[in-house]
Structure formats: C-alpha cells, structure tokens
Image (tube, rainbow, N blue to C red):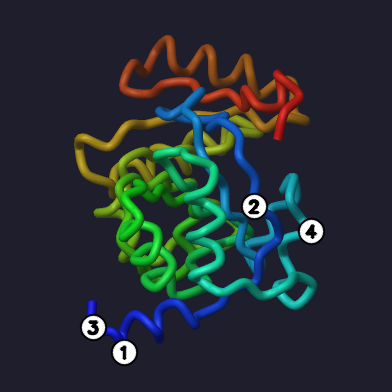
Amino acid sequence: MSGQNAIATNNRNYPIVETFHSVQGEGYWTGANAFFIRLGGCDVHCPWCDTKESWNPERHPQYYVADLAKIAQQTKTEIVIVTGGEPLMHDLLPLTTAIKELGMAVHLETSGAYPYTGSFDWVTFSPKQFKSPHPSIYKHANEIKVVITSEYDLKWAEQQSALVPTQTLKYLQPEWNTPKSKEIIFNYVRNNPQWRISLQTHKMLHIK
C-alpha cells in the first residue's frame, strides 16, 4: 500500500459500540480466543435482538482505523471479529486492510443486508427475514447461521441455505428467550443431518 493510501485508510473512522477481548460463543469457531469490534448502526431491527443499543450509529463515538487496529493488536489474539449492529452498513475494506497488515485474521458476523465489502478470512452469514440479504453476500458465506423461533423459520433457513456454496457449514440457533426453539431445532437436525446446532455458549458461561 502506498503511503498516501495508508494515510487515507488509517484516517477512516467508524462508530464503535464497544471493543472487547473474549472467546467466540457461536458457530464453528466456538471457544476460540478473539477480539471483537462491534460497529454501530443497524436497520434490520430483529425484535429479539440483544444489542439494540447498537442500532443508532450516532449514539456511539467514532474511532480511527489505526487506533482500532492497535487496540486489537495489543490483545495478542489471532482473530478479530467485526460484528454489530449490521457491520456491512459501512465500507469495511479500510478496517480489514489495517487489521490484516498486522498479521491477524478477520472474521465477519453479518445479516448480509448490505453489499459485501472488506477482506475476510471467515464470514458468518446470519440472514434475517426482517430485511432481505443483498445478493453479494451468498458466495462469501463460510457458515450460515439462522436463528429459530418457530417452525416457519426452518423454511426460511432452507431457502437461504440453498443460495450459499455447497461447502458452507449450516447452523440453526435457538432464540435465547424462546424455550420451544431448542426442541424444534433438536428434532429438525436429527432428521436433517446437513444442519448443526449452534448455541450461545457465552450466555451460558455468563461472559461477554
């Protein structure tokens, strides 16, 4: 990267809800040491969202890319997870470029509601019925993770999974506050072995 481009990248800023060092609680990378960058802004508005404070980006301070990358590097983790909110509301290429230049892998957690941007080593695609995914997301999905509240959601999961690459891992995740969802998923996975169960283990462990 030229000096001028590097300056432009490092001067890009994003609304940040929080950053924290923890472990991945869901999906394929469950239990992995990771640093999280939660971006502000989301108009998907899932009724059961557990981070509604992230919806309005104007409520959160702006951080420069260079500062975010430096904070992530100080944790000495190998994985940085960009989440939200809905992170694809922002152009993520400056952020992912800066992090990768420091030798860390970058993961994305997204509903896919906006065009895909950035350079990621792993993409967790969690499509929501409240705002249809942008077509650009499907080919990038390493795993698809659908939150289930009712039997109807299983139809949505199958429709969306038909659009991702054949090697994409498929997860069903019970909605935390809907007890019946666990039984729905358990019975479905027993009869449809192409799917796996994802649990929010960070909530079980009472950690962030």
Q: Is residue 137 above or below residue 192?
A: below
Residue 135: quarter of image:
bottom left
Q: Secondary structure at mark 4?
A: helix
- Indicate which label's residue lies in the foreground, 1 or 4: 1
Residue contact between numbered discs 1 and 4, judged by CB atoms under 8 Å: no
Label annotation for residue 190: none
Q: Cα distance, mark 2 to mark 4? A: 14 Å
Label annotation for residue 53: 4
Mark 3 vs 4, N-terminal side: 3
Q: Which residue is at 46% across, 30% downward?
A: 27
Which quadrant, please, contains the N terminus?
bottom left
Q: Position of residue 152 (x, y in %)?
A: 57, 37
Q: Which residue is at 40% across, 28% downward?
A: 28
Residue contact between numbered discs 1 and 3, judged by CB atoms under 8 Å: yes
Mark 3 vs 2, N-terminal side: 3
Mark 2: which amino acid?
Thr
Residue indicated by mark 1: 4
Residue indicated by mark 2: 19
Q: Is residue 195 above or below residue 74?
A: above
Disc 1 crowd, CA 10 A, few/some/many (<14, 14-19, 20+): few
Q: Position of residue 172 (x, y in %)?
A: 49, 29
Q: Secondary structure at mark 2?
A: strand
Disc 3 crowd, CA 10 A, few/some/many (<14, 14-19, 20+): few
Residue indicated by mark 3: 2
Q: Cα distance, mark 1 to mark 2? A: 28 Å
Mark 4: which amino acid?
Glu
Residue 207: quarter of image:
top right
Which quadrant, please, contains the C terminus?
top right
Disc 2 crowd, CA 10 A, few/some/many (<14, 14-19, 20+): some
- Indicate which label's residue lies in the foreground, 1 or 2: 1
Q: Residue furthest bottom?
A: 4
- Indicate which label's residue lies in the foreground, 3 or 4: 3
